[in-house]
C-alpha cells in the first residue's frame, strides 16, 4: 500500500473519531449538568445577617424568634462572652450561636429546621447546640437561686391577708410534667399516670415569679413528694424558721406548708356565689391558695414563652432534661432585665398546640404520707398556729 493510501485511511479514522467525540459531548454535558450537586448553604454570612436583621428590625420579629427583646438578647450574648462560657469561632459569633439555641427552644426546631432558617450545616448546629447544653448547669447555678431579701417580701408585708401569718414564707413549690421521648425499651419508668412520657420537675419560685430552684430529670412515674425528697438530698435547703407553700401532693411539714385536706381549697371554689370561709381551716386554705397561685402562674408563663416544654423533642435524654432548666434561666434573666410578659397573652404559639402532649397537672391528694413523721407533726402545729391566728383576726 502506497503512502498516499495510508494517509487517506488515517484521515478517515480521525474524522470518525471527531464525529464520535462531538456526538458524545452534548450527552456528557447534560449528564454532568443534571448530576451536579447544588450547594445548599450559599453563604456563611447568611445566618449572621439574619440575626442582625431580627435584632434591628420590628420588635415582634425578635420576640417571635427568640422570645425576648433585642436588648436582653444582646445582654445575654455579652454575658456569655465576658464570662468565657461561649466564645466566638472563626466564622460564627456568640450572638449567632445564641440565636441557634433560642430558636431551637422557641420552636422545637430540628437541625433540619435550623439549616433552613440559618443556612449552616447540620454538624454546625449539632456542635453549637450541645455547647449551650453544656453550660446550662453553670447558668442554672448562677441565675436559679433565691434572692436575699431581709424580712418578708413586700407582697406579703403589704397585704393584711398574708401578714404576719406568712412573714417567713419564701415562696411556693409545685411539680410540673414536661414531655420526653425515649426508645420503646426504655419508656416504662417515664410513663406518667396519663399514659404519656414525661419528666417530673420540681420548681420553687418567689413572689416576684423568679425561679429559685429547679429539679429536672425524674421520670414521669415519680410522685411530686419523691422528687422533693430527692431535691433535699441534692442541694435544696430551706433555712430554719422559713417555709414554702405546697399543694396537697406533699406532706405538711414546718418547711413545706400544705393546705388542710378534705377542706375546699382551689380558687375556683371561692368564686362568685360561694359562701365565705366558715372556720379557721377554710380561711387558711383560701389564703394559702391565693399566695401559692404564684407558682402556677410561673409555670404557665414558662410554657407559654417556651412552648418546647409542651412537646417531645429529638435530643438525647441527657439534653432533654436540661431544657426546662434552660427555659427557667432565660426566664429569670428576662425578669432581671425588666422584660415584658404582657405580650405573651396575645402571642400565638410557635408550635402547633395540636401536638402538645397531654400531661398530668400534679399529684393532688393521691398519695399516702407517713402521718407519724416528726416533721409532719411540727408542720401541723405550725399550720394550726397560723390558721387560728388568721381566724381570730378575721372574726375580730
Image (cartoon, rainbow, N blue to C red):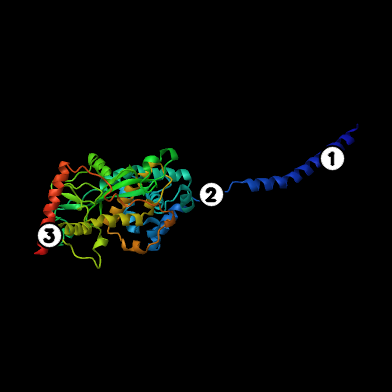
Secondary element at tag 1: helix
Image quarter of the N terminus: top right
As drawn, 299 above or below 345: above
Q: Is residue 136 above or below residue 285?
A: above
Q: Residue at x 53, y 49 (%)?
A: 40
Q: In the picture provided, is 182 more to the left or to the right than 80?
A: right
- Please state which of residues 363 and 216 is positioned toward the viewer in this rendering: 363
Q: Residue furthest bottom?
A: 273
Residue 58 or 65: which is nearer the viewer? 65
- Along the horizontal axis of the image, is 76 left or right of 9? left
Q: CA distance from mark 1 to mark 2?
A: 48 Å
Residue 9 picture location, percent across and down: 86, 37
Marks 3, 1: nearer the viewer: 3
Q: CA distance from mark 3 to mark 1?
A: 118 Å
Residue at label 3? 391
N-term-proximal mark, 1 vs 2: 1
Disc 2 marks which residue?
Answer: 40
Measured as percent of width and height from the top left, residue 102 is found at 38, 52
Q: Indicate which disc residue 176 carries.
A: none
Pick the residue in front: 169 or 8: 169
Where is residue 271? Give x, y as percent. Answer: 25, 65
Say which element carries label 2.
loop
Vertical arrangement, residue 156 with respect to residue 370, above or below: below
Disc 1 vs disc 2: which is toward the camera?
A: 2
Mark 2 is surrounded, within 10 Å at the Cα level, by few (under 14), some (14 to 19) or many (20 or more) other residues, namely few
Label 1: which residue? 12
- Residue occupying the far right of the picture: 1
The numbered mark, 3 or 1, whose residue comes first in the sequence reads 1
Q: Secondary structure at mark 3?
A: helix
Q: Residues within 10 Å of mark 1 (few under 14, many from 20)?
A: few
Amino acid at each position: 500500500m502506497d503512502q498516499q493510501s495510508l494517509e487517506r485511511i488515517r484521515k478517515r479514522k480521525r474524522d470518525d473519531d471527531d464525529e464520535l467525540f462531538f456526538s458524545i459531548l452534548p450527552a456528557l454535558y447534560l449528564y454532568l449538568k443534571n448530576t451536579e450537586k447544588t450547594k445548599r448553604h450559599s453563604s456563611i454570612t447568611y445566618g449572621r445577617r439574619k440575626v442582625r436583621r431580627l435584632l434591628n428590625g420590628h420588635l415582634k420579629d425578635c420576640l417571635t424568634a427568640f422570645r425576648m427583646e433585642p436588648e436582653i438578647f444582646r445582654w445575654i450574648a455579652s454575658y456569655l462572652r465576658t464570662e468565657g462560657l461561649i466564645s466566638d469561632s472563626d466564622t460564627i459569633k456568640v450572638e449567632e450561636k445564641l440565636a441557634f439555641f433560642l430558636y431551637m427552644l422557641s420552636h422545637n426546631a430540628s437541625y433540619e429546621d435550623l439549616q433552613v432558617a440559618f443556612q449552616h450545616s447540620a454538624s454546625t448546629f449539632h456542635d453549637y447546640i450541645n455547647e449551650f447544653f453544656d453550660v446550662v448547669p453553670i447558668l442554672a447555678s448562677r441565675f436559679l437561686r433565691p434572692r436575699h431579701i431581709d424580712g418578708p417580701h413586700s407582697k406579703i408585708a403589704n397585704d393584711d391577708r398574708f401578714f404576719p401569718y406568712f412573714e417567713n414564707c419564701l415562696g411556693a413549690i409545685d411539680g410540673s410534667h414536661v414531655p420526653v421521648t425515649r426508645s420503646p425499651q426504655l419508656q416504662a419508668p417515664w410513663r406518667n399516670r396519663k399514659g404519656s412520657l414525661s419528666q417530673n420537675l420540681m420548681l420553687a419560685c418567689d413572689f416576684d415569679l423568679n425561679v429559685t430552684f429547679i429539679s429536672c430529670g425524674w421520670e414521669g412515674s415519680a410522685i411530686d413528694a419523691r422528687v422533693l425528697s430527692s431535691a433535699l438530698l441534692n442541694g435544696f435547703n430551706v433555712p430554719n424558721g422559713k417555709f414554702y407553700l405546697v399543694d396537697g401532693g406533699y406532706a405538711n411539714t414546718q418547711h413545706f406548708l400544705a393546705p388542710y385536706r378534705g377542706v375546699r381549697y382551689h380558687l375556683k371554689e371561692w368564686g362568685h356565689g360561694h359562701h365565705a370561709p366558715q372556720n379557721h381551716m377554710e380561711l387558711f386554705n383560701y389564703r394559702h391558695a391565693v399566695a401559692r397561685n404564684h407558682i402556677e402562674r410561673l409555670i404557665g408563663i414558662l410554657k407559654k414563652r417556651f412552648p418546647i416544654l409542651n412537646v417531645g423533642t429529638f435530643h438525647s435524654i441527657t439534653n432533654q432534661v436540661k431544657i426546662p432548666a434552660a427555659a427557667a434561666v432565660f426566664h429569670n434573666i428576662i425578669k432581671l432585665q425588666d422584660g415584658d410578659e404582657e405580650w405573651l397573652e396575645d402571642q400565638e404559639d410557635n408550635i402547633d398546640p395540636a401536638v402538645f402532649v397531654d400531661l398530668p397537672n400534679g399529684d393532688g391528694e393521691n398519695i399516702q404520707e407517713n402521718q407519724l413523721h416528726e416533721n409532719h407533726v411540727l408542720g401541723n402545729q405550725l399550720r394550726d398556729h397560723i390558721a387560728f391566728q388568721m381566724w381570730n383576726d378575721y372574726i375580730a
